[in-house]
Image: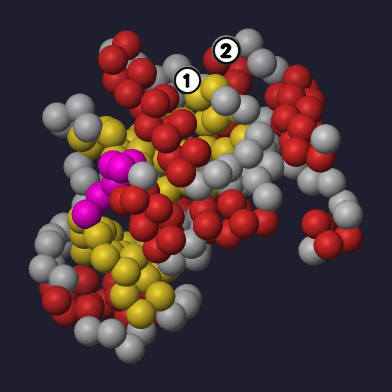
Amino acid sequence: AFDILGIKYTGADYLSAALAMDKGITKSLFDMRKVLNPKGEIFKKDEDFNSWDIFPCVIKPCSGGSSVGIARADNREEFNKAVEDAFRYEDEIVIEQFVTGREFSVGVLGNEALPPIEIIPTTGFYDYKAKYQAGLTIEECPAKITEAEDKLLRKRAMDAYRALCLEAYARMDFILDEKGDAYCLEANALPGMTPTSLLPQEAEAVGIDYPSLCEKIVELSLEKYK
């Protein structure tokens, strides 16, 4: 609508935002561009999802946000309930193998990845409640990781950013497993931008305060209108 009306806006264009919003399309593009992500499948409501036999797994609506409708299943009974719940939100879902490891988020500003931030849920699973209820999640930035791990996470963030043709700024979520592999879970084309959100925390770690970050995002976004 903004493009049609000639209104300038920050961040990804409509196509990139739509690609990143659909987890099924994101997954397909990641596979095509060799961006490591958890093994998974996409199912529509009228398809037989009982062929899935990898546990534990994660079930999530294709186009949801803020972890709404997401659930972990450790067995067939939990799986059936989680699938039923996910289909209440929409008619297409993603089922993925649960990857055990540490959870990170990596912001991208222009053509540069910011320092990874580690997300440590005190409840064990980073669901909607853990995201928005104070005290249920510890956020550590810069993350306590090795130089090699930092470099890997930043590279994978840029790979995901480019695979989805994102612009100006975005944030990618990862699981770093025990072997040191970084699995990209999804991309956020319009990440949270309160002063305490993840991307501003990462920017602060490299000396970019909140007003400067907002100004930088505007400058980067205006480049596409030249």
Q: Could you tell me residue 172's position as x and y percent?
A: 46, 39
Disc 2 marks a residue whose amino acid type is Val
Q: Quadrant of residue 182?
A: top left
Q: Residue at x 75, y 38 (%)?
A: 224
Image coordinates for residue 56, horizontal then vertical, percent: 16, 58
Say if the magenta span includes residue 83. Answer: no
On-image quarter of the N terminus: bottom right
> For this view, does 86 lie left or right of residue 169?
left
Q: Main secondary structure of the magenta part?
A: loop
Magenta highlight range: 34-39
Quadrant in the picture for the C terminus: top right
The secondary structure type at the circle numbered 2 is: loop
Crowd tier of the residue under label 1, counting other residues whose Cα lies within 10 Å: few below 14, some 14–19, many 20 or above: many
Q: Nearer the viewer, residue 26 or 107?
A: 26
Q: Is residue 137 above or below residue 26?
A: above
Q: Quadrant of residue 94?
A: bottom left
Residue for badge 2 = 206
Q: Vertically, is 115 above or below 47?
A: above
| Three-letter amino acid code at the position of disc 1 | Pro
Q: Give coordinates of residue 194: x percent, y percent.
A: 68, 37
Q: Secondary structure at mark 1?
A: loop
Q: Nearer the viewer, residue 126 or 38?
A: 38
* Residue pictured at 63% horizontal, 39% vertical: 167
The percent coordinates of residue 63 (x first, y second) are: 49, 65
Residue placed under numbered mark 1 in the picture: 115
> Residue most toward the bottom?
46
